[in-house]
Image: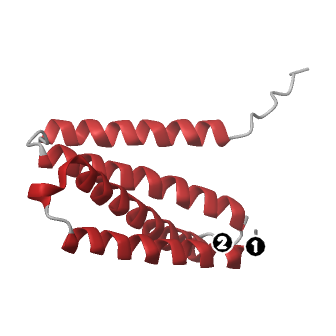
């Protein structure tokens, strides 16, 4: 898939997810929705945030790193967008249950940071150690 096609599909998907989010936000009554209404709310929010943050992150990365391979920038921006969206949605879920506190927030940020560090370390190519003579 070309970069232009990826951005078009991602943009269309983000707009569609955003429309779904606003539809759920304004048409679903939380008092009678049950778990399905809340699941649709959080899922559509996560998709919208992932798409928007991914596109913005890719554009910023292209502006900052002009010499990088574009497919690598797409992958990094998408991964980080999903992690940030998951962080936001989990924080909102905890807040809705009155379980979010400062130490939970720090713990969430630490977990997301560790996951990102794992992805970074797995993505590095090992360097060969030259034998000393």
Q: Residue tagged by mark 2?
A: 6
Q: Is residue 112 above or below residue 57?
A: above
Q: Element type at marker 1?
A: loop
Q: Residue tagged by mark 1?
A: 2
**Residue 28, image x and y in percent?**
20, 66
Instruction: Tell me the number on the disc at residue 113.
Output: none
Give residue 120's quadrant in the image. top right
Q: Name the quarter where the C terminus is drawn.
A: top right
132 with respect to 17 (left or right)? right
Judge whether residue 92 can be spotted in this image. Answer: yes
Label 1 crowd bin: few (<14), some (14–19), many (20+), radius 10 Å: few
Q: Is residue 73 above or below residue 16?
A: above
Residue most toward the front? 32
80 with respect to 120 (left or right)? left
Q: Name the quarter where the N terminus is drawn.
A: bottom right
Label 2 crowd bin: few (<14), some (14–19), many (20+), radius 10 Å: few
**Residue 48, image x and y in percent?**
40, 67
Mark count: 2
**Mark 2 touches mark 1? (CB < 8 Å):** yes
110 with respect to 5 (left or right)? left
């Amino acid at each position: 898939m070309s970069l232009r096609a990826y951005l078009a599909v991602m943009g269309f998907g983000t707009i569609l997810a955003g429309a779904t989010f606003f539809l759920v936000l304004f048409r679903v009554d939380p008092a009678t929705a049950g778990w399905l209404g809340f699941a649709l709310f959080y899922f559509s929010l996560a998709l919208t945030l992932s798409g928007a943050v991914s596109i913005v992150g890719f554009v910023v990365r292209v502006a900052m790193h002009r010499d990088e391979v574009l497919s690598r920038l797409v992958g990094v921006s998408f991964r980080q967008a999903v992690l940030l969206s998951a962080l936001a949605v989990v924080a909102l879920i905890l807040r809705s249950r009155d379980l979010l506190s400062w130490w939970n927030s720090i713990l969430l940020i630490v977990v997301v940071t560790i996951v990102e560090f794992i992805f970074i370390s797995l993505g590095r190519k090992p360097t060969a150690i030259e034998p000393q003579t």
